[in-house]
Image (cartoon, rainbow, N blue to C red):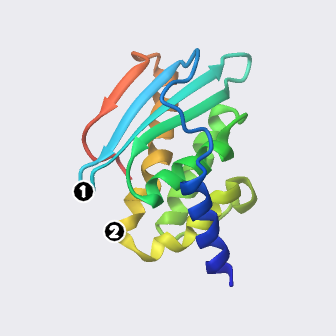
């Protein structure tokens, strides 16, 4: 029963993506990741409120790929919007651990991201589910390092 619900959540994010946009007004960071094993590509844009605690003010993604990669990116944007960078980065790490079969520590914070827990059973699909989350981690790192606001990662992201 739970697997059916999770399947429905993933399909809903794929068919009705959240925060999918080619542009994000006032974005501070733009990263492009691709998975050369399957051809999935994803652009991620962050706008950061750089107050006393830097916070994700807005996040958007766009790209082409399988239902898992695009739906996971959609779920990620909902889970991290409004979070401070450290918290969002920790959440991405928690999602990564879940994809590698480790216990989930922040199930409630992952929101619909928890629906991807079953993907861990299919190693070839894990990289698809992680694409958006690893782009987020890279975007946060890029912002913190004060690097050029546009960064393209052509090689397979570190998982």
Quarter-wise, where is residue 58 in the image? Answer: top right
Q: Position of residue 156 (x, y in %)?
A: 28, 47
Which is more N-terminal, label 2 or label 1? 1
User: Residue 37 has which mark?
Assistant: 1
Say which residue appears at 42% left-offset and 49% top-offset.
131
Q: Which residue lies under the disc numbered 2?
A: 124
53, above or below 138, in the image: above
Circles 1, 2 touching at the beta carbon (< 8 Å): yes
Q: Position of residue 33 (x, y in %)?
A: 35, 39
Which sits in the foreground, 120 or 17?
Answer: 17
107, above or below 81, in the image: below
Say which residue appears at 63% left-offset and 69% top-offset.
8
Quadrant of the image for the N terminus?
Answer: bottom right
Kindly state the secondary structure of the residue where label 2 is placed.
helix
Residue 69 as seen in the image, left or right of residue 151: right
Kindly state the secondary structure of the residue where label 1 is placed.
loop
Disc 1 crowd rating (10 Å Cα; few below 14, some 14-19, many 20+) is few
Q: Position of residue 38 (x, y in %)?
A: 27, 57
Say which residue appears at 45% left-offset and 54% top-offset.
69
Disc 2 crowd rating (10 Å Cα; few below 14, some 14-19, many 20+) is few
Which sits in the foreground, 50 or 39?
Answer: 39
């Amino acid at each position: 029963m739970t697997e059916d619900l999770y399947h429905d959540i993933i399909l809903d994010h794929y068919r009705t993506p959240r925060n999918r946009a080619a542009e994000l007004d006032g974005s501070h960071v733009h990263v492009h990741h691709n998975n050369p094993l399957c051809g999935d590509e994803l652009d991620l844009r962050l706008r950061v409120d750089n107050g006393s605690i830097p916070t994700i003010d807005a996040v958007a993604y766009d790209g082409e790929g399988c239902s898992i990669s695009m739906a996971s990116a959609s779920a990620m944007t909902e889970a991290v919007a409004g979070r401070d960078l450290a918290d969002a980065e920790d959440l991405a790490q928690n999602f990564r651990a879940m994809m590698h079969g480790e216990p989930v520590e922040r199930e409630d914070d992952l929101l619909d991201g928890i629906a991807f827990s079953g993907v861990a059973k299919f190693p070839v699909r894990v990289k698809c589910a992680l694409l958006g989350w690893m782009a987020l981690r890279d975007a946060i790192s890029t912002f913190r390092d004060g690097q050029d606001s546009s960064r393209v990662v052509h090689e397979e992201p570190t998982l």
